[in-house]
Amino acid sequence: MANNYLGMSGLVGISVVLLGASCAFAQQIDPIRLPDPPAASATVTATPEEIGDVLLVRQRYEAAIAAYKKMEPPSADVWNKMGIANQLMFNQQEASRCYQESIKLNPKNANTLNNMGTLYDSMKRFRDAEKMFRKAVVVDPKSALAYKNLGTSLLSQHQYQKGWSAYQKAQALDPEIFRNKAALRVENPGTAQDRGAMNYFMAKGCMRSGMNDCAIDHLRRALNEGFTNVKKIGADEEFAGLRGVPAFDQLLAEQGP
């Protein structure tokens, strides 16, 4: 979801989590990429698309859409950006139309396919979301973000082993994928079971990246959601490296005998 940044100089971070939930069960929107700014001595007239990009970064979504609409005819990238802006305003129908227009013009844009998947997921059309994420990874087999989103989609359908497999592929492509929080995210609260499953497997991913604190945090969430228990965690060799870590021992102690 992968460099999950937008920006004026190269790539600059922006984080948007819809529905305000504190859990990490989310689908991540592929970001737009803005060009490096011109030299201070250069005289440049910004295009409507460039103006829209800046407005989108500043979360002025309606103004960004108005700027993008001045591009005639809109390119596949512009339709994708209008889709992002509408999705972040919860305008699902219009976001869907924009993504579909983008896909018509460029059916092999992994970013747009991923974003359409996040939209379907937010609408609880999980099978459709899964199809879009699978198309995205076929078009771009190196997209860690699309694999991560595919994994989350599969977990939401209780396909835990397949979801974990997709997470492993995401992490193999980008060891930082579970650490990166500066993404455009669309929160999907799901069920407690879904959130617990996602956090349990996220903890495994964190362990493989050597991020003990991250793993413990996700394990706590998985326990709180009732997906797992102390015995299951203790028997899972993925978490053997946490034994003796004070925060981990405290987490298990809090659960009682």
Image (tube, rainbow, N blue to C red):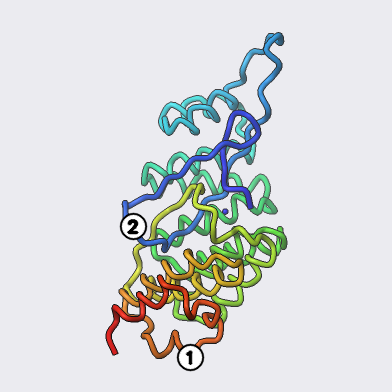
Q: Residue at x 62, y 30 (%)?
A: 73
Query: Residue 35 lies in what quarter of the image?
Result: top right
Of label 2 and label 1, which has the lower sequence position?
2
Given the image, on which type of amino acid does mark 1 rest?
Answer: Ala
Q: Position of residue 128 (x, y in %)?
A: 50, 66
In front: 231, or 251? 251
Q: For this view, does 48 lie left or right of residue 172? A: left
Question: Circle 1 sits on which residue?
Answer: 235
Q: Position of residue 166 (x, y in %)?
A: 60, 72
Instruction: Kindly report the distance in space between the C-alpha atoms of the residues bearing marks 2 and 1.
Output: 28 Å
Q: Is residue 106 above or below residue 144?
A: above
Q: Residue at x 45, y 30 (%)?
A: 58
In front: 57, or 242? 242
SS type, badge 2: loop
Q: Is residue 183 above or below residue 256?
A: above
Q: Residue at x 56, y 76 (%)?
A: 164
Query: Residue 21 lies in what quarter of the image?
Result: bottom left
Q: Position of residue 8 (x, y in %)?
A: 59, 29
Given the image, on which type of amino acid does mark 2 rest?
Answer: Ser
Q: Nearer the viewer, mark 2 or mark 1?
A: 1
In contact (CB < 8 Å): disc 2 and disc 1 = no
Question: Circle 2 sits on which residue?
Answer: 22
Q: For this view, does 197 lie left or right of residue 189? A: right
Q: Residue at x 54, y 53 (%)?
A: 180
